[in-house]
Image (cartoon, rainbow, N blue to C red):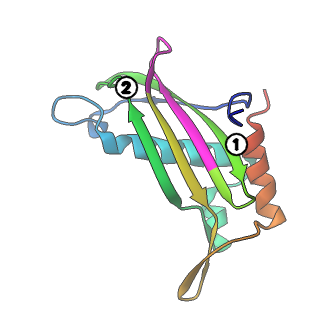
Amino acid sequence: MNKFTKKKEWNLTKTILPQHTDHAGIMWHGSYFNFLEEGRIDALNKVGITYSTLSKKGYEIPVISAQIKYKISFTHGEKLLLKSQFNLVNKIKLKCKTLFLKVNGDIGAEALIELVLIRKEKDSIKLVRQVPPEIKKFFLLLEEGPKI
């Protein structure tokens, strides 16, 4: 069974602005990545930690894999709803599944992003193989979904 199916979703509504589109007024493929990042940062904020706080503690959560399936294009001026679910895998990998929904509920795109926690130390970057409890609690809150 897919671990994402019964989880609560993190929601973020966005409006497609000119800077998100190509010359034809269609949402540019790279803009999806910006919205995905914004959705993850927003969810982290909602569970009680900012990305800048993590960064100040020497941690980052880089994307190690990204897959987007584009289904229906979005156009300038349209609103879209991002619905995201998180899953902590093997205690070190955070997966994020996001749907980009049109106002009528149609799926415009779906994305699956994989992230890991790294630690920046002096001149090196190291994969964190055991997420510290003070950070793991936020990952588990992401996985639970928002309190409604």
Furthest residue toward top: 104
- Is residue 25 visible in the rendered structure shown here? yes
Q: Please give the range of residues in magenta.
A: 95-108
**Residue drawn where x is 17% and y is 29% of the image:** 24
Give the vertical position of 11 relative to 140 (above or below): above
Q: Amino acid at mark 1?
A: Lys
Q: SS of the residue at dot 1?
A: helix
Task: Mark yes or no: residue 45 visible.
Answer: no
Q: CA distance from mark 2 to mark 1?
A: 29 Å
In the image, what residue occupies the spot 74% across and 43% down? 143
Q: Is residue 38 left or right of residue 127?
A: left
The C terminus, quarter of image: top right
Residue 21 position, x and y percent, is 26, 35
Image-based side of 20 in relation to 44, left or right: left
Label 2, on which residue? 71
| Residue ID at (74%, 36%) | 145
